[in-house]
Image: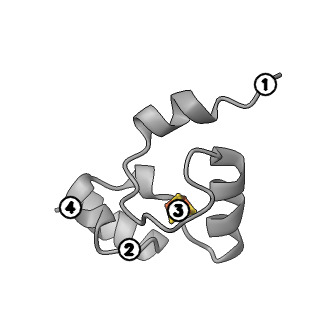
Amino acid sequence: MDCKKEVNLTRCNCSYEPCPRKGTCCDCISYHKSYGELPACYFNDADEKTYNRSIEFFIKSRSR
Ligand code: SF4
């Protein structure tokens, strides 16, 4: 199976430009999971820009 990086990038809402994992979702999820976090695409665009990827913030953002 080929990497779908180019397709993934069209759906990625992450605004953290220097990240080398953008579009490589397997690496992105693995990275944030290792910190007990979720990737940018779990958050709306405004919340994503806070760079707070914590599960606690995710729950708060969904209950507003
Ligand atoms: S969510 Fe995190 S790992 Fe994924 S592209 Fe953005 S900054 Fe990189």
Residue placed under numbered mark 4 in the picture: 46
Please rate how many residues cluster around mark 3, counting C-alpha atoms within 10 Å: few if below 14, some from 14 to 19, many from 20: many
Residue placed under numbered mark 2 in the picture: 51
Residue 33: quarter of image = bottom right
Asked if disc 4 and disc 3 are in contact, CB closer than 8 Å, the reply is: no
Towards the viewer: 52 or 1: 1
Which residue type carries mark 3?
A: Leu
Residue 61, label in figure: none
Q: Residue at x 36, y 65 (%)?
A: 59
Please rate how many residues cluster around mark 2, counting C-alpha atoms within 10 Å: few if below 14, some from 14 to 19, many from 20: some
Q: Which quadrant: the N terminus? A: top right
Towards the viewer: 27 or 42: 27
- Left or right: residue 49 compared with residue 16: left
Of mark 1 and mark 4, the one earlier in the sequence is: 1
State whether residue 52 is above or below residue 3.
below
Of mark 2 and mark 1, the one earlier in the sequence is: 1
Residue furthest to the left: 64
Towards the viewer: 38 or 50: 50
Q: Position of residue 52 (x, y in %)?
A: 39, 76
